[in-house]
Image (spheres, rainbow, N blue to C red):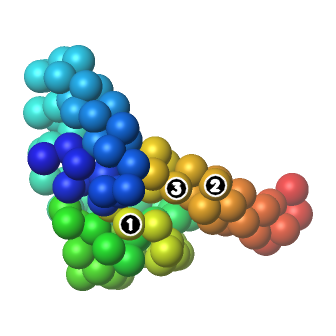
Amino acid sequence: MAPVIMGRPDRPEYGEELGESFCRMDPGIAAQFARDSRSILPRVKARTLVVQCTEDAIAPLAVGEYTAAQLPNSELVYLKARGHCPNLSAPQETIAVISAFLEKGKSETGG
């Protein structure tokens, strides 16, 4: 499943690395990560960036759109990256989006 999650058939080593990290993960931590937290989204007050890959086998576009709609102070950004782990498969694009979000926040708060 890791190669599908990664979404980079041109880079099979990415899928292998992700699969190995899944095998090393503590099951208790994995269970907590996987729990459904949709009910708390409307209570999140922090400015939030929702990053959605345009082609994600795990989380289709509707997931990012739903998440952003439920978070009161969110910004939804679509990445050109494919897969579910853009921090691994497209780190430069991911860094650029996060950096722009942080810079925008600094200018809005005067910091």
Tell me which label, 1 or 2, sits earlier in the chain. Answer: 1
Residue drawn at x 52%, y 55% is: 90
Q: In front: 23, or 110?
A: 23
For the image, the number of numbered tags is 3
Circle 3: element type: loop
Give the Cα distance between marks 1 and 2.
13 Å
Dot 3 crowding, Cα within 10 Å, few <14, some 14–19, many 20+: some
Numbered tag placed on residue 32 in the rendering: none
The percent coordinates of residue 23 (x first, y second) are 17, 23
What x and y, as percent, mark residue 30? 17, 31
Query: Circle 3 sits on which residue?
Result: 90
Q: Is residue 29 left or right of residue 11?
A: left
Return the residue nearer the eye: 31 or 1.
1
Distance between the alpha carbons at the discs numbered 3 and 2: 6 Å
Label 2, secondary structure: give it. helix
Distance (Cα) linking label 1 and label 3: 8 Å
**In the shown orientation, is residue 29 left or right of residue 71?**
left
- Vertical arrangement, residue 97 with respect to residue 90, above or below: below
3 and 2 marks in contact (CB < 8 Å): yes
Query: What type is the residue that disc 2 sits on?
Result: Gln
Between 87 and 102, the residue placed more toward the observer is 87
Assign the C terminus to one quadrant of the image. Answer: bottom right
Q: Quadrant of residue 53?
A: bottom left
Residue type at tag 3: Ala
Quadrant of the rendered image containing residue 107: bottom right
Looking at the picture, tell me which residue is in the foreground, 43 or 81.
81
Residue 15 vertical position relative to residue 66 in the rendered view, above or below: above
Residue receiving disc 2: 92
Tags 1 and 3 in contact by the CB under 8 Å rule?
Answer: yes
The residue type indicated by label 1 comes to Arg
Q: Which mark is residue 82?
A: 1
